[in-house]
Image (tube, grey):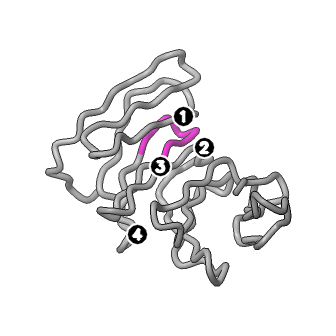
Amino acid sequence: MNGTHDYTIKLWDIDTGQCQRTFSGHEGFVFSVCLDKAGHKILSAGEDNTLKLWDVKTGQSLRTFKGHTDHVTAVSYNSDIGFAVSAGSDKTLKLWDVTTGRCLRTLAGHTGPVKALYLNRDTSYIASGSEDKTLKLWFLDWELEET
């Protein structure tokens, strides 16, 4: 699976090298994709300032997440609890309830675009890397409030 500069996501068969499905719907480059643990859903991050949740089987967009004010550059998804985190050129991270599409919290602290993130397996912390040459660790207390 990869995001592309033609505004699509492609799902590839590793054995044959053939493209199995193309997902279309972003209105800009796709910078990051994340497949859920079961392999049923994809969450993508785009230049169009949105995240999109996709059904792998049908190729349909299930939900669009809006809240970033600039490109969404990275995404991580824990499908066990329906929680995702996104990073953006707007220098923020956003925590999402994937089931409802609501932004639960916005994390700010970088002074440059956030380009990379990692959500640990038990979702107790997030690591983010930025063009400001810092790596930040964010510890989650799970007393999340909607923003």
Look at the image and tell me in which quarter the N terminus lies.
bottom right
Residue identified by numbered label 1: 116
- Label 3 amino acid? Ser
Q: Quadrant of residue 26?
A: bottom right
Under circle 3, the secondary element is strand
Image spot of residue 71 (x, y percent): 62, 47
Give the Cα distance between marks 4 and 3. 15 Å
* Dot 1 and dot 2 residues touching (CB under 8 Å): yes
Counting every numbered tag in the picture gives 4
Mark 4 or 1, which is nearer the eye?
1
User: Residue tagged by mark 3?
Assistant: 76
The relative height of residue 24 versus residue 127 in the rendered view (above or below) is below
In this view, the residue in front, 129 or 27, is 129
How packed mark 4 is, by other alpha carbons closer than 10 Å (few <14, some 14-19, many 20 or more), is some
Quarter of image, res 2: bottom right
Q: Where is residue 140 in the image (x, y as percent from the top left)?
A: 23, 41
Q: Tell me which amino acid carries mark 1.
A: Ala
Crowdedness of circle 2 by 10 Å Cα count: few (<14), some, many (20+)?
many
Q: Disc 2 marks which amino acid?
A: Thr
Q: Mark 2 points at which residue?
A: 73
Determine the residue positioned at 30% across, 32% down. 138
